[in-house]
Image (cartoon, coloured by chain):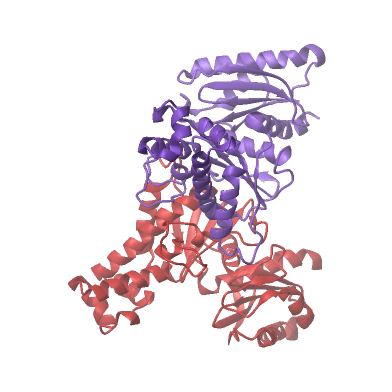
Chain colours: A purple, B red
Amino acid sequence: MAIGVDIGGTKTVVGLVAPDGSVLNSHVVPTPSQDSEALFAVVAEAVAQVAGSVTGADGGAVIGIGIGVAGLVDAPGRTVVFAPHLAWRGEPVAARFEAMTGLPVEVENDVAATAWAEYVFGAGRGVDPLLVLTVGTGIGGGIVIGGQLIRGATGASGEVGHVPFVPDGRPCACGANGCWEQYASGTALTRAARELVASGDPASRALSQACEGDAEQLDGAMVTELALAGDPASIAVIARIGALLGEGLAGTVAILDPQRVVVGGGAAQAGDLLLQPAREALAARLVGAAFRPVPPIVAAECGEQAAMIGAAELARQRFGAAQT
Amino acid sequence: MAIGVDIGGTKTVVGLVAPDGSVLNSHVVPTPSQDSEALFAVVAEAVAQVAGSVTGADGGAVIGIGIGVAGLVDAPGRTVVFAPHLAWRGEPVAARFEAMTGLPVEVENDVAATAWAEYVFGAGRGVDPLLVLTVGTGIGGGIVIGGQLIRGATGASGEVGHVPFVPDGRPCACGANGCWEQYASGTALTRAARELVASGDPASRALSQACEGDAEQLDGAMVTELALAGDPASIAVIARIGALLGEGLAGTVAILDPQRVVVGGGAAQAGDLLLQPAREALAARLVGAAFRPVPPIVAAECGEQAAMIGAAELARQRFGAAQT
């Protein structure tokens, strides 16, 4: 078995993951996001608790730790180069945790770890090439080709959300303008719903009631809930974002030619309300769509713990062979 | 040794390629582009001539044939699914040539074959991941990751030219609007120069003289020649296209994170006049450019015969092991 860790901007999940992907024991702790040393200490303590639950019964059964981090991780999986929501900058995270826990450690970008979970256990089982998107605050991408996670020259591959989509378009947190994720993410969904409410359009009545007239209180989950309950305006907003998701996806699919696209993240809660317009836009926009199969777009299956599960599985595969 | 074939819309090149990438003997024949059977016959005859030049001296030294085609080739390298400038539609090209020549045959997209030549012999030697662009009529892409040419699920990977770049932008031959290649290819370069001449801008005097006042006679080679001779308007036009090349490249680089980008094709004749603005635009637009090395953009080295050389080398590697 391996331990998986998913370090998010607000909370961190640590769990013991079996070779079949099931989570046997997990802890959620708040992330001390702006204090590097406190973050090491908190994660190490949670790891020790989870590891202790095994070693009590079956000493030495944990063969390694896989850590998913929202940020840029170097290609060998040792150093967190930059993580926008954490204090780590060029931090040798794997070496530090190895010293603290005595276990071998692999660090991965959290979307890459999510992609690996979907590839091994989820909606992309055995699919090759596989493209996994996480659509939430932004759009992240994870790529599997030839049975391998694609990390790129510097560990920075898969940044599909920052593909230029609209020249001189909306400013993005990355510093550039017009990135795809400014138009097709959960953030874009919330923005579109807020604009509709603020416009006073009578069609937005249900949305307006949900936020008691204060558009800034709307979030993606509220829009999704209304849409799933049948509100036409919410359905239309999600459909518009889905179409922009599919249109931008035509670029990444043209480059990678994946066999399937798996979509997870918060926005994927809307299911086919988001994915069906995305499928139609992809088929309409993809080069050569008349002469090739257009890859299916399906919902992710591994859920919120995907990054933790995938990170653990990566560690199990890397360190398992060395121990047996 | 292997035989390489590059089937273009107007001419076909067939050559004998040594393991070091040198071309020992090559023939150029016109391509009967709209007659499928004539195309098989013409290529088979040229192959027989080239093969005969070897078998006379050293029987059996040719171990296979690699064929590069501008079009969609299936992932196993057997069938030309669609080639816009040829009559082949779902044509089992490898099997047909095997029957005609008695040699094993591999078919590849011509840009993929070009990328392989640059990876083995050219400006991308040992670079992994490697992205190769051919910038001419459109923009083609070839990708090497983990020492393997990336073919995608259907053989359609690398179509970087058709990444959406401008919403509802210029119509593209692929049927969609706003594809990157409509803004940053040799075709875009020619269009920009023609518009400048047609505008009557006094700065366009040298361009106007070169085409004797008929803007429609301008082509990319003329603009490049004037720019290399120092004409400021031609230099500015190429720089503008180069900047759009770099800006769009920021998308493909964000996805693939290549170690280096090699640029070939007709437009690359302009050298640094095109590539330096592309480098600057890529560095300005690439996500995380402050935290990671921005991949260098360098000129291709294998020249016009790159697709033929790469196709031959792919065949040599695939079929060589079986024979020895």
Residue B214 x %, y % = 29, 83
Q: Nearer the viewer, residue A316 or B4?
A: A316
Q: Quadrant of residue A15?
A: top right
Residue A267 x %, y % = 55, 37
Q: Quadrant of residue B306?
A: bottom right
B76 relative position to A41: left or right: right
For the point 75% across and 28% down, the residue is A22
For the point 59% across and 46% down, the residue is A275
B175 relative position to B68: left or right: left
Residue A140 x %, y % = 54, 40
Residue B289 x %, y % = 42, 42
Query: Does B24 sit above or below residue B76?
Result: below
Q: Nearer the viewer, residue B226 or A173?
A: A173
Query: Does B284 sit above or below residue B310?
Result: above
Q: Is residue A192 visible?
A: no
Q: Is residue B65 visible?
A: yes
Q: Nearer the viewer, residue A239 or A90?
A: A239
Q: Quadrant of the C terminus of chain B?
A: bottom right
Q: Nearer the viewer, residue B200 or B43?
A: B200
Query: Does A87 sit above or below residue A235?
Result: above
Q: Quadrant of the N terminus of chain B?
A: bottom right
